[in-house]
Image: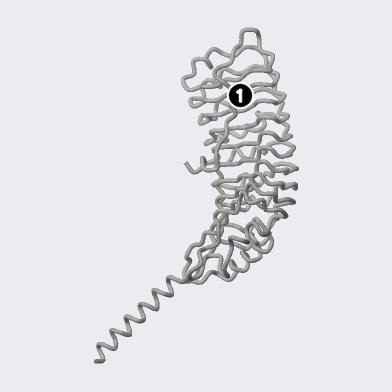
Amino acid sequence: MGSSFRSVFVFLLLIALLLRAGHSKTLKRDVKALNEIKASLGWRVVYSWVGDDPCGDGDLPAWSGVTCTDQGDYRVVTELEVYAVSIIGPFPVAVTNLLDLTRLDLHNNKLTGSIPPQIGRLKRLRILNLRWNKFQDVIPPEIGELKKLQYLQLSFNHFKGEIPKELANLPDLRYLYLQQNRLVGRIPPELGNLPYLRQLDVGNNHLVGTIRELIHIEGGFPSLRNLYLNNNYLTGGVPAQLANLTNLEILYLSYNKMTGIVPADLASIPRLTYLYLDHNMFTGRIPDTFYKHPLLKELYIEGNQFKPGVRGKGMHKILELSDTDFLV
């Protein structure tokens, strides 16, 4: 009889433990933060955020765009994706209390003002996507404190001021998108120290300086594949040292104020596929080696001062990358 009682007791205890494991509580800090965000974002989000627990409780699922992960006896919010729902107003500062976030995606909304300096608290963040909003202030240097960041997308806003050199403090950064803003000054050459940076897009801003200044760090940009510098106010020539970026596939220099000849060394870049030189003030001829390059699909040269007979190669098209290309 005693043995049977103990067996039943152990069985019930196991059931209780399993039920407890299956209904972990969401960390109060995250519940509070998500409810503050809910109060600030407006009805477009609120209608799908029902229940008291953002991670779901009982019959109610997790809030739309909220991903939670078990961490010991609690659940924590690790991803927040609220995009293309016309959120209006300032950046919800309560987001910076979600200290376990690895992904924050608020793109394609109507957020205004500035990114708060508290963004630097999100030490586990790997992906930050705020493109297609209406942010107007400077890019906060505190983003440089997000040491695990791999993907930074701030394009299609109204950011002003200079590109903070603190972005060079992000050792894992792979993709940096800053195009279509109102950024001024020079591109920090310190970005060349980022060992894994594959894409740098600063097109359509008001940047000045030369490519020589950008790549002067020896061994810089070792992983760079795509370099978009188009539609700025860059001057000077194309330095032969650019050929040291041996992983380069796309070089987009259109619509600047660059001068000089196109060095034959560029044709030695083994993976070069797209080269856009149009609408500058280049002179001379295009070396024959470019036309013999095995991978070069497009060489666009319109709107320069090349000698007669210089011809382009391929059909010019605008290159776009989707939000998921960086995950490939």
189, 117: nearer the viewer: 117
163, 54: nearer the viewer: 54
Q: Check the image and report above or below for 307 versus 226.
A: above
318, 117: nearer the viewer: 318
Residue at 63% x, 63% y: name it.
97
**In the image, residue 290 lies at what x, y percent?**
53, 17
- Farthest residue toward the top? 308
Disc tally is 1
Q: Check the image and report above or below for 59 versus 104.
A: below
> On the image, numbered disc 1 is attached to which residue?
276
**In the image, residue 159 lies at what x, y percent?**
72, 44
Residue at 60% x, 57% y: name it.
122
Three-letter code, disc 1:
Tyr
Q: Quadrant of the N terminus?
A: bottom left
**In the image, residue 162 lies at what x, y percent?**
73, 41
Q: Does residue 225 appear left or right of residue 154 in this picture?
A: left
- Farthest residue toward the bottom? 1
Residue at 68% x, 59% y: name it.
42
**Crowd tier of the residue under label 1, counting other residues whose Cα lies within 10 Å: few below 14, some 14–19, many 20 or above:** many
225, 50: nearer the viewer: 50
**In the image, residue 83 lies at what x, y percent?**
61, 50
Give the image's coloring scheme.
one colour
Give the secondary structure at mark 1.
strand
Residue at 64% x, 23% y: name it.
238
